[in-house]
């Protein structure tokens, strides 16, 4: 790959992230030239709690899971990140170490900007505005996640997860919406902090009631109205 082509590929990767969308081309070229590239295989650890954070990473391709592990080894996935998402901005701004695990879930290509390059972008109003929007969005997602774990039942959390996945991976079929992504009950449990047996019991109950169909790690929502009704917290309806 020629130097020019390599830079163009890097620029395309940067532009997948909204924080770079308003920067002019000459600035993007400079950033692309300063970027480092990292590639990971599915299941490969990218970082873990306590690791230093000295770069901002942009997911150019692939996807990662961000998670916590309890003392007894239980994993809770707090975020699934994909193309265009960034990693490390909060730690860089707060000068703190990593708080979570980050693991590649597919072949993943990261573009990384070291701390001096990142800090050099902060005076740029367009970049900083995009950065603040990203941090605010992540904060909102974290609050919703914490709310779900603290006050919502497993049934409500599971219904919300299915609806969320149907929005990002859903494909309409004759009798419903299939979540066109293979996902195990173990992974579902990690995403909503519940054991696999409890997930299985709830899914089988919905299957019996013809709310969903289960087939080879794929779920089809047959009665979206019912699932949406379950997803509404009683607190929200007061």
Image (cartoon, rainbow, N blue to C red):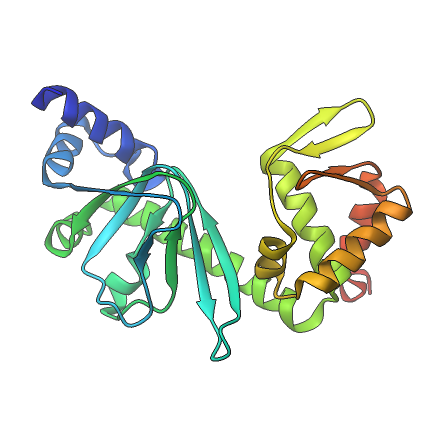
Vertical placement of residue 93 versus 19, above or below: below
Q: Residue at x 62, y 42 (%)?
A: 165
Left or right of 160 on screen, residue 129: left
Q: Residue at x 43, y 46 (%)?
A: 105
Q: Residue at x 51, y 59 (%)?
A: 77
Does residue 94 appear in this view? yes
In the image, farthest residue toward the right:
209
Left or right of 66 on screen, residue 146: right
Left or right of 26 on screen, residue 165: right
Q: Residue at x 84, y 49 (%)?
A: 206
Vertical placement of residue 129 versus 52, above or below: above
Q: Position of residue 38 (x, y in %)?
A: 22, 43
Q: Position of residue 27 (x, y in %)?
A: 14, 34
Q: Quadrant of the N terminus?
A: top left
Q: Quadrant of the C terminus?
A: bottom right
Residue 210 placement: quadrant? top right
Q: Position of residue 99 (x, y in %)?
A: 36, 69
């Amino acid at each position: 790959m020629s130097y020019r082509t390599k830079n163009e590929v890097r620029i395309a990767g940067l532009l997948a992230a909204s924080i770079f969308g308003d920067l002019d081309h000459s600035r993007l070229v400079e950033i692309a030239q300063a970027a480092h590239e990292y590639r990971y295989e599915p299941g490969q650890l990218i970082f873990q709690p306590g690791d230093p954070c000295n770069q901002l990473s942009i997911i150019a391709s692939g996807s990662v899971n961000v998670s916590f592990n309890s003392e007894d080894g239980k994993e809770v996935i707090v975020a699934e990140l994909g193309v265009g998402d960034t990693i490390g901005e909060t730690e860089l701004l707060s000068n703190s170490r990593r708080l979570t695990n980050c693991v590649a879930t597919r072949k993943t290509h990261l573009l990384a900007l070291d701390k001096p390059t990142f800090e050099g972008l902060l005076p740029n109003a367009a970049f900083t505005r995009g950065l603040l929007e990203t941090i605010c969005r992540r904060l909102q997602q974290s609050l919703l996640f914490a709310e779900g774990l603290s006050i919502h039942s497993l049934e409500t959390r599971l219904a919300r997860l299915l609806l969320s996945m149907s929005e990002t991976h859903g494909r309409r079929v004759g009798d419903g919406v299939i979540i066109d992504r293979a996902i195990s009950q173990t992974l579902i449990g990690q995403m909503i902090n519940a054991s696999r047996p409890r997930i299985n019991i709830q899914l089988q109950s919905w299957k019996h009631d013809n709310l969903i169909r289960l087939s080879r790690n794929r779920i089809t929502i047959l009665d979206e109205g019912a699932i949406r009704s379950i997803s509404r917290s009683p607190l929200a309806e007061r």
